[in-house]
Image (tube, rainbow, N blue to C red):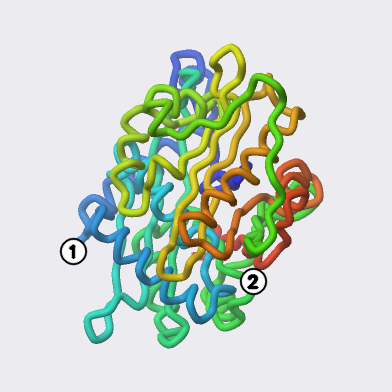
Amino acid sequence: MAARPAIGSATTTMRFGRCAVDCCDRRARKTVRRFCGVLTQWRTMPNFELLTAADVQLMQGLAQRVTATRPDLVNGDATFGELAWNWGKGHAGDGASWPRRLWFSSGNLVAWSWAFLPHQVRRSDGSVKDVTGAYLAYQVHPDHAGLVDEVIDWYDGTAADIERTVMPSAADEFALKRWAAHGYVTDPASLGDVGTWTQLNERDLTDVEQPVLPDGFRFRTADEAGPKAAVQAHLDAWAPSTYTAEGYQGVRKTAPYRGDLHILVEAPDGTMASSTIMWLDEANRTAEFEPVGTHPDYRRRGLGRAMLLHGMHLARSAGATHMTVACLGAPGHPQARGLYYSVGFRQFTRDVPLIKTRAAG
């Protein structure tokens, strides 16, 4: 997708240089103390477990089972492809701040929670972002909907005394009522023309237009272009980015990653101008674009559109009959949505960003 809301959208960004520290006010110093206190708290919790690659595979299995029966209830950050992408690219740098809990019934995973706790993020331009709030990704099988209360209790206990955000599916009326009962309300940052909510778009693959590239451009796969080119294509499209060569190694290690379904567009000068990864869910015969990006110097030339069409042809050849892609849904973010609509996608579901402030308990 073209963009996702930052984890913990209402959090504070700080830079820890001498000037920033010398000039910070009392409120900023309190934020730093709270940030450190939270880290100490969750690192010493009993039965504390961090998210692993094996956990992600179980979580993807749950995504497949929910997709097969109630695809509208799959949370935007709990899809088959999103789980692989988020874990793969971030586990090396951020994994130490990722506690999780799993719920099983008759040996099958039926619910999970994955908390993103305060941590520092280093980006490709050298800047450092301090995430001081918490964010929760989660999924509950509809046959075990009552577990959402346990998910919420676990999250509140794990991220106690800091601001907490979460984005359940708008179609999950039961979950929305339970989050509200626990004190979660609509996140103000998600409102208005530049709101931070996301929508999931879908289309079938029965009739896909043929892609057309400008003269001199050509399609490549990550297998052909190599890791260095694949990483640089993402960095160019998303600068400043947290992506690294180590992050790409993590992505390649995830169970569903396929280098032949990782598509790039090469410019005449050798620059990888656009790129996307497709995640194939063979059980449901669906594929998901995540992420999708184009180098700023090569935008508005039809490269992204051609790449998506080319990717859908490849996905269909690999066995997919259905395709999804996510994007920001608010009116003030039309670019990615317009691109996806131009190749036949339409909105399927959307999320509801919720927040619980420290004052709310």
Q: What residue lies at 61% left-to-right and 15% top-to-bottom?
A: 268
Quickly name the residue at label 2. 170
Which quarter of the picture shows residue 202?
bottom right
Amino acid of disc 1: Asn
Mark 2: few/some/many CA within 10 Å (<14, 14-19, 20+)? some
Q: Secondary structure at mark 1?
A: loop
Residue 125 percent coordinates (x, y) = 50, 19
Whether residue 254 is situated above or below residue 110 in the rendered picture? above
Amino acid of disc 2: Ala
Numbered badge on residue 47: 1
Which quarter of the picture shows residue 167?
bottom right
Viewer-proximal residue, 202 or 27?
202
Give the mark nearer the N terminus: 1 vs 2.
Answer: 1
Please indicate whether residue 351 sits to the left or right of residue 121 in the image. Answer: right
Tell me whether the residue at label 1 lies in contact with that at label 2, contact meaning CB atoms closer than 8 angstroms: no
Residue 305 percent coordinates (x, y) = 70, 40
